[in-house]
Amino acid sequence: MKHFLRMLVQVCLYFYCKCLWRCLKFVVRKLTGRCELQRICYSTKPGAGRTMKIETSLRSSKNKLLQSSISVHPDAIEKTIDAIMDLKRINPDVNPQLGVSLQACLLQIVGYRNLIAEVEKLRREPYDSEDPRHEEMLLKLWKCLKPDSPLEARISKQWCEIGFQGDDPKTDFRGMGLLGLYNLLYLAERDASAAQQILSDSLQPKYREVTKEDLSKCSKAEWEKKKFDKAIGYSFAIVGINITDLAYNLLVSGALKTHFYNVAPEAPTLSHFQQTFCYLMHEFHKFWIDEDPLDIMEFNRVREKFHKRILKQLQNPDMALCPHFAASESLINL
Protein backbone atom coordinates (compact mmCIF):
# COMPACT_ATOMS: atom_id res chain seq x y z
CA MET A 1 0.00 0.00 0.00
CA LYS A 2 2.81 2.39 0.90
CA HIS A 3 4.49 1.66 -2.43
CA PHE A 4 1.25 2.42 -4.29
CA LEU A 5 0.77 5.71 -2.43
CA ARG A 6 4.37 6.71 -3.14
CA MET A 7 3.88 5.99 -6.84
CA LEU A 8 0.61 7.94 -6.83
CA VAL A 9 2.28 10.96 -5.21
CA GLN A 10 5.13 10.86 -7.76
CA VAL A 11 2.69 10.70 -10.68
CA CYS A 12 0.63 13.59 -9.30
CA LEU A 13 3.77 15.62 -8.65
CA TYR A 14 4.98 14.97 -12.19
CA PHE A 15 1.74 16.17 -13.78
CA TYR A 16 1.56 19.12 -11.39
CA CYS A 17 5.08 20.25 -12.29
CA LYS A 18 4.41 19.70 -15.98
CA CYS A 19 1.25 21.78 -15.92
CA LEU A 20 2.91 24.43 -13.76
CA TRP A 21 5.83 24.66 -16.19
CA ARG A 22 3.53 25.06 -19.18
CA CYS A 23 1.52 27.72 -17.38
CA LEU A 24 4.71 29.53 -16.47
CA LYS A 25 5.89 29.44 -20.10
CA PHE A 26 2.53 30.86 -21.20
CA VAL A 27 2.73 33.70 -18.67
CA VAL A 28 6.35 34.53 -19.59
CA ARG A 29 5.47 34.61 -23.28
CA LYS A 30 2.60 37.00 -22.62
CA LEU A 31 4.80 39.24 -20.50
CA THR A 32 7.82 39.29 -22.84
CA GLY A 33 6.10 38.86 -26.18
CA ARG A 34 8.67 36.16 -27.05
CA CYS A 35 8.42 32.38 -27.32
CA GLU A 36 10.90 30.11 -25.53
CA LEU A 37 13.12 29.71 -28.61
CA GLN A 38 13.40 33.50 -28.92
CA ARG A 39 14.23 33.93 -25.25
CA ILE A 40 17.00 31.31 -25.46
CA CYS A 41 18.55 32.78 -28.60
CA TYR A 42 18.45 36.36 -27.33
CA SER A 43 19.61 35.69 -23.76
CA THR A 44 22.26 32.97 -24.24
CA LYS A 45 25.58 33.40 -26.04
CA PRO A 46 26.29 31.08 -29.00
CA GLY A 47 27.90 27.75 -28.24
CA ALA A 48 27.00 24.69 -26.21
CA GLY A 49 24.88 26.59 -23.68
CA ARG A 50 22.53 27.93 -26.35
CA THR A 51 22.43 24.83 -28.57
CA MET A 52 21.74 22.42 -25.71
CA LYS A 53 18.88 24.62 -24.43
CA ILE A 54 17.39 24.79 -27.94
CA GLU A 55 17.73 21.01 -28.28
CA THR A 56 15.99 20.41 -24.93
CA SER A 57 13.19 22.84 -25.80
CA LEU A 58 12.53 21.22 -29.18
CA ARG A 59 12.70 17.67 -27.85
CA SER A 60 10.32 18.34 -24.94
CA SER A 61 7.78 20.19 -27.07
CA LYS A 62 4.30 18.72 -27.56
CA ASN A 63 4.32 19.82 -31.20
CA LYS A 64 5.45 17.11 -33.64
CA LEU A 65 7.07 19.62 -36.01
CA LEU A 66 9.31 20.90 -33.21
CA GLN A 67 10.07 17.38 -31.95
CA SER A 68 11.06 16.13 -35.40
CA SER A 69 13.16 19.21 -36.25
CA ILE A 70 16.19 17.81 -34.36
CA SER A 71 16.36 14.80 -36.69
CA VAL A 72 15.70 16.28 -40.13
CA HIS A 73 18.10 15.95 -43.04
CA PRO A 74 20.68 18.80 -43.15
CA ASP A 75 19.31 19.92 -46.52
CA ALA A 76 15.85 20.39 -44.96
CA ILE A 77 16.97 22.62 -42.08
CA GLU A 78 16.18 25.93 -43.82
CA LYS A 79 12.70 24.72 -44.72
CA THR A 80 12.20 23.44 -41.17
CA ILE A 81 13.16 26.83 -39.69
CA ASP A 82 10.66 28.57 -41.98
CA ALA A 83 7.99 26.16 -40.72
CA ILE A 84 8.94 26.84 -37.08
CA MET A 85 8.77 30.61 -37.67
CA ASP A 86 5.28 30.19 -39.19
CA LEU A 87 4.18 27.96 -36.32
CA LYS A 88 5.38 30.47 -33.72
CA ARG A 89 3.97 33.39 -35.74
CA ILE A 90 7.36 35.10 -35.86
CA ASN A 91 7.91 37.59 -38.65
CA PRO A 92 11.37 36.84 -40.19
CA ASP A 93 11.64 40.41 -41.45
CA VAL A 94 11.24 41.74 -37.91
CA ASN A 95 13.38 38.98 -36.33
CA PRO A 96 16.00 38.12 -39.00
CA GLN A 97 18.65 37.10 -36.45
CA LEU A 98 16.45 34.41 -34.92
CA GLY A 99 16.44 32.33 -38.11
CA VAL A 100 20.24 32.54 -38.36
CA SER A 101 20.66 31.50 -34.72
CA LEU A 102 18.21 28.59 -35.04
CA GLN A 103 19.92 27.42 -38.21
CA ALA A 104 23.33 27.34 -36.50
CA CYS A 105 21.86 25.37 -33.57
CA LEU A 106 20.03 22.87 -35.78
CA LEU A 107 23.13 22.31 -37.92
CA GLN A 108 25.03 21.36 -34.77
CA ILE A 109 22.23 19.19 -33.35
CA VAL A 110 21.57 17.31 -36.60
CA GLY A 111 25.30 17.13 -37.35
CA TYR A 112 25.99 15.49 -33.98
CA ARG A 113 23.40 12.79 -34.67
CA ASN A 114 24.88 12.19 -38.13
CA LEU A 115 28.39 12.04 -36.68
CA ILE A 116 27.29 9.29 -34.30
CA ALA A 117 25.94 7.33 -37.28
CA GLU A 118 29.18 7.83 -39.26
CA VAL A 119 31.39 6.80 -36.33
CA GLU A 120 29.16 3.82 -35.59
CA LYS A 121 29.44 2.66 -39.20
CA LEU A 122 33.25 2.71 -39.00
CA ARG A 123 33.19 0.92 -35.64
CA ARG A 124 31.02 -1.84 -37.05
CA GLU A 125 33.16 -2.35 -40.16
CA PRO A 126 35.68 -5.11 -39.38
CA TYR A 127 39.27 -4.98 -40.55
CA ASP A 128 39.58 -7.11 -43.71
CA SER A 129 43.09 -8.21 -44.69
CA GLU A 130 41.72 -8.99 -48.17
CA ASP A 131 40.70 -5.35 -48.66
CA PRO A 132 43.58 -3.40 -50.30
CA ARG A 133 42.32 -0.16 -48.77
CA HIS A 134 42.51 -1.57 -45.24
CA GLU A 135 45.96 -3.03 -45.84
CA GLU A 136 47.21 0.24 -47.30
CA MET A 137 46.09 2.16 -44.22
CA LEU A 138 47.76 -0.32 -41.87
CA LEU A 139 51.07 -0.24 -43.73
CA LYS A 140 50.91 3.55 -43.83
CA LEU A 141 50.51 3.53 -40.04
CA TRP A 142 53.77 1.60 -39.72
CA LYS A 143 55.61 3.99 -42.07
CA CYS A 144 54.40 7.04 -40.14
CA LEU A 145 55.41 5.65 -36.75
CA LYS A 146 58.61 3.86 -37.81
CA PRO A 147 59.87 5.78 -40.86
CA ASP A 148 63.45 4.51 -40.47
CA SER A 149 62.55 0.86 -39.89
CA PRO A 150 61.17 -1.01 -42.94
CA LEU A 151 58.57 -3.67 -42.19
CA GLU A 152 60.13 -7.01 -43.09
CA ALA A 153 56.82 -8.83 -43.66
CA ARG A 154 53.09 -8.21 -43.37
CA ILE A 155 52.85 -10.92 -40.69
CA SER A 156 55.67 -10.04 -38.34
CA LYS A 157 56.59 -9.69 -34.68
CA GLN A 158 57.69 -6.15 -35.58
CA TRP A 159 54.08 -5.01 -35.07
CA CYS A 160 54.70 -5.37 -31.33
CA GLU A 161 57.17 -2.48 -31.63
CA ILE A 162 54.27 -0.06 -32.15
CA GLY A 163 52.09 -1.66 -29.53
CA PHE A 164 50.07 -4.42 -31.19
CA GLN A 165 49.69 -7.68 -29.29
CA GLY A 166 50.77 -10.17 -31.91
CA ASP A 167 52.25 -10.61 -35.38
CA ASP A 168 49.01 -9.61 -37.17
CA PRO A 169 47.31 -6.36 -36.02
CA LYS A 170 43.96 -7.24 -37.59
CA THR A 171 43.00 -9.24 -34.48
CA ASP A 172 43.42 -6.15 -32.29
CA PHE A 173 40.85 -4.14 -34.28
CA ARG A 174 37.95 -6.46 -33.39
CA GLY A 175 36.51 -4.23 -30.67
CA MET A 176 36.56 -0.91 -32.51
CA GLY A 177 36.72 -2.09 -36.12
CA LEU A 178 38.12 0.35 -38.67
CA LEU A 179 37.48 3.27 -36.30
CA GLY A 180 40.55 2.31 -34.26
CA LEU A 181 42.76 2.23 -37.36
CA TYR A 182 41.32 5.52 -38.68
CA ASN A 183 42.13 7.28 -35.41
CA LEU A 184 45.64 5.86 -35.04
CA LEU A 185 46.49 6.78 -38.62
CA TYR A 186 45.05 10.27 -38.21
CA LEU A 187 47.27 10.85 -35.17
CA ALA A 188 50.34 9.38 -36.88
CA GLU A 189 49.83 11.46 -40.05
CA ARG A 190 48.59 14.77 -38.67
CA ASP A 191 50.81 14.91 -35.58
CA ALA A 192 53.70 12.63 -36.53
CA SER A 193 56.33 14.04 -34.16
CA ALA A 194 54.00 13.88 -31.14
CA ALA A 195 52.82 10.36 -32.08
CA GLN A 196 56.41 9.13 -32.39
CA GLN A 197 57.31 10.75 -29.06
CA ILE A 198 54.37 9.10 -27.28
CA LEU A 199 55.32 5.78 -28.87
CA SER A 200 58.93 6.19 -27.74
CA ASP A 201 57.87 7.12 -24.19
CA SER A 202 55.50 4.16 -23.98
CA LEU A 203 58.38 1.76 -24.72
CA GLN A 204 60.73 3.18 -22.10
CA PRO A 205 61.20 1.41 -18.77
CA LYS A 206 60.97 3.75 -15.80
CA TYR A 207 63.49 3.68 -12.98
CA ARG A 208 61.99 4.32 -9.57
CA GLU A 209 63.76 5.68 -6.53
CA VAL A 210 63.03 3.79 -3.32
CA THR A 211 61.38 5.93 -0.61
CA LYS A 212 60.49 5.08 2.98
CA GLU A 213 56.82 5.14 2.08
CA ASP A 214 57.41 2.69 -0.78
CA LEU A 215 59.40 0.34 1.43
CA SER A 216 56.62 0.37 4.01
CA LYS A 217 54.19 -0.94 1.40
CA CYS A 218 56.32 -3.82 0.13
CA SER A 219 59.55 -5.61 0.90
CA LYS A 220 62.85 -4.40 -0.57
CA ALA A 221 63.07 -7.57 -2.67
CA GLU A 222 59.65 -6.85 -4.19
CA TRP A 223 60.63 -3.25 -4.87
CA GLU A 224 63.87 -4.30 -6.60
CA LYS A 225 61.74 -6.35 -8.96
CA LYS A 226 59.22 -3.56 -9.56
CA LYS A 227 61.58 -0.63 -10.03
CA PHE A 228 63.02 -2.09 -13.25
CA ASP A 229 59.72 -3.50 -14.45
CA LYS A 230 59.48 -2.70 -18.19
CA ALA A 231 55.70 -3.20 -18.09
CA ILE A 232 55.40 0.26 -16.54
CA GLY A 233 55.08 1.54 -20.13
CA TYR A 234 52.10 0.59 -22.26
CA SER A 235 51.29 -0.76 -25.72
CA PHE A 236 50.82 2.33 -27.91
CA ALA A 237 48.44 0.84 -30.51
CA ILE A 238 46.34 -1.05 -27.96
CA VAL A 239 46.00 2.07 -25.81
CA GLY A 240 45.07 4.06 -28.94
CA ILE A 241 42.27 1.59 -29.65
CA ASN A 242 41.22 1.80 -26.00
CA ILE A 243 41.13 5.60 -26.09
CA THR A 244 39.10 5.33 -29.31
CA ASP A 245 36.59 3.32 -27.28
CA LEU A 246 36.58 6.04 -24.62
CA ALA A 247 36.01 8.77 -27.24
CA TYR A 248 33.25 6.68 -28.84
CA ASN A 249 31.43 6.26 -25.52
CA LEU A 250 31.72 9.98 -24.78
CA LEU A 251 30.20 10.69 -28.20
CA VAL A 252 27.32 8.21 -27.98
CA SER A 253 26.42 9.18 -24.40
CA GLY A 254 26.10 12.82 -25.48
CA ALA A 255 28.92 13.97 -23.19
CA LEU A 256 30.86 15.38 -26.16
CA LYS A 257 28.01 17.71 -27.11
CA THR A 258 29.50 20.39 -24.85
CA HIS A 259 32.82 20.17 -26.67
CA PHE A 260 31.51 19.89 -30.24
CA TYR A 261 28.87 22.61 -29.85
CA ASN A 262 31.67 24.96 -28.71
CA VAL A 263 34.20 23.83 -31.31
CA ALA A 264 32.16 23.38 -34.50
CA PRO A 265 30.34 26.53 -35.68
CA GLU A 266 28.08 24.31 -37.79
CA ALA A 267 27.87 20.51 -38.06
CA PRO A 268 30.61 18.54 -36.25
CA THR A 269 32.44 16.18 -38.61
CA LEU A 270 34.57 13.06 -38.42
CA SER A 271 37.65 15.31 -38.40
CA HIS A 272 36.39 16.97 -35.22
CA PHE A 273 36.03 13.51 -33.64
CA GLN A 274 39.53 12.49 -34.72
CA GLN A 275 40.99 15.75 -33.40
CA THR A 276 39.29 14.99 -30.10
CA PHE A 277 40.87 11.53 -30.13
CA CYS A 278 44.31 13.11 -30.63
CA TYR A 279 43.69 15.42 -27.69
CA LEU A 280 42.60 12.49 -25.50
CA MET A 281 45.71 10.51 -26.47
CA HIS A 282 47.98 13.43 -25.55
CA GLU A 283 46.16 14.01 -22.26
CA PHE A 284 46.03 10.33 -21.32
CA HIS A 285 49.75 9.99 -21.94
CA LYS A 286 50.47 12.90 -19.57
CA PHE A 287 47.91 11.58 -17.08
CA TRP A 288 49.53 8.12 -17.14
CA ILE A 289 52.93 9.62 -16.37
CA ASP A 290 51.49 11.77 -13.56
CA GLU A 291 49.66 8.80 -12.03
CA ASP A 292 52.95 6.85 -12.03
CA PRO A 293 51.36 3.35 -11.97
CA LEU A 294 53.40 0.42 -10.71
CA ASP A 295 52.63 -1.70 -13.76
CA ILE A 296 50.31 -2.17 -16.72
CA MET A 297 47.84 -4.04 -14.50
CA GLU A 298 46.76 -0.63 -13.22
CA PHE A 299 45.66 0.47 -16.68
CA ASN A 300 41.91 0.07 -16.06
CA ARG A 301 42.11 2.06 -12.83
CA VAL A 302 44.03 4.89 -14.50
CA ARG A 303 41.72 4.87 -17.53
CA GLU A 304 38.61 5.07 -15.35
CA LYS A 305 40.07 7.94 -13.35
CA PHE A 306 40.96 9.74 -16.58
CA HIS A 307 37.46 9.12 -17.94
CA LYS A 308 35.89 10.70 -14.84
CA ARG A 309 38.16 13.73 -15.14
CA ILE A 310 37.13 14.30 -18.79
CA LEU A 311 33.43 13.88 -17.90
CA LYS A 312 33.80 16.47 -15.15
CA GLN A 313 35.42 18.92 -17.57
CA LEU A 314 32.59 18.40 -20.08
CA GLN A 315 30.01 19.43 -17.47
CA ASN A 316 31.20 23.00 -18.00
CA PRO A 317 29.03 24.45 -20.83
CA ASP A 318 31.94 26.63 -21.97
CA MET A 319 34.36 23.70 -22.22
CA ALA A 320 36.33 22.98 -25.40
CA LEU A 321 38.64 19.99 -24.91
CA CYS A 322 41.10 21.12 -27.57
CA PRO A 323 41.08 24.94 -27.58
CA HIS A 324 43.42 25.20 -30.58
CA PHE A 325 40.65 23.63 -32.67
CA ALA A 326 37.95 25.86 -31.19
CA ALA A 327 35.84 27.88 -33.57
CA SER A 328 33.81 29.66 -30.88
CA GLU A 329 35.42 33.00 -31.78
CA SER A 330 33.95 32.74 -35.27
CA LEU A 331 30.44 32.13 -33.95
CA ILE A 332 28.23 35.12 -34.60
CA ASN A 333 26.91 36.50 -31.33
CA LEU A 334 23.27 36.96 -32.24
Image (cartoon, rainbow, N blue to C red):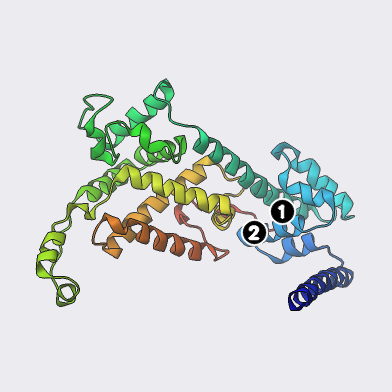
Identify the residue at horizontal 64%, vertical 49% (top origin): 108
Query: Where's residue 310, x and y in %?
Result: 46, 61
Sequence-first disc among 1 and 2? 2
The residue that label 1 is drawn on is 101
In this rendering, would 33 be left or right of 138? right
Q: Are marks 1 and 2 in contact (CB under 8 Å)?
A: yes
Asked whether 331 or 309 is in front, the reply is 309
Tell me: residue 1, above or below residue 229.
Answer: below
User: Where residue 275 sits in the image (x, y, percent)?
Assistant: 45, 46
Query: Exactly how many numbered labels are in the figure?
Result: 2
How far apart are the alpha carbons under marks 1 and 2?
8 Å
Picture residue at 27% right of the left edge, 45% below the top? 199
Compare residues 314 and 272 and report the one nearer the observer.
314
Q: Nearer the viewer, residue 189 or 4?
A: 4
| Amino acid of disc 2 | Pro
Tell me which corner region of the image, top left, top right, bottom left or bottom right, holds residue 316: bottom right
Q: Is residue 182 above or below residue 272?
A: above
Decide if residue 72 is on the left or right side of residue 304: right
Q: Is residue 92 visible?
A: no
Q: Please tell me the numbered disc located at residue 46.
A: 2
**In this rendering, position of residue 142 left or right of residue 213:** right
Q: Residue at x 31, y 47 (%)?
A: 194
From what the image shows, is residue 1 above or below residue 96?
A: below
Type of amino acid under label 1 = Ser
For residue 285, the mark is none
Q: In the picture, residue 309 is in which quadrant?
A: bottom left
For disc 2, the neighbor class at 10 Å (few under 14, some 14 to 19, many from 20) is many
Mark 1 residue element: helix
Query: Does 334 appear above or below 73?
Result: below
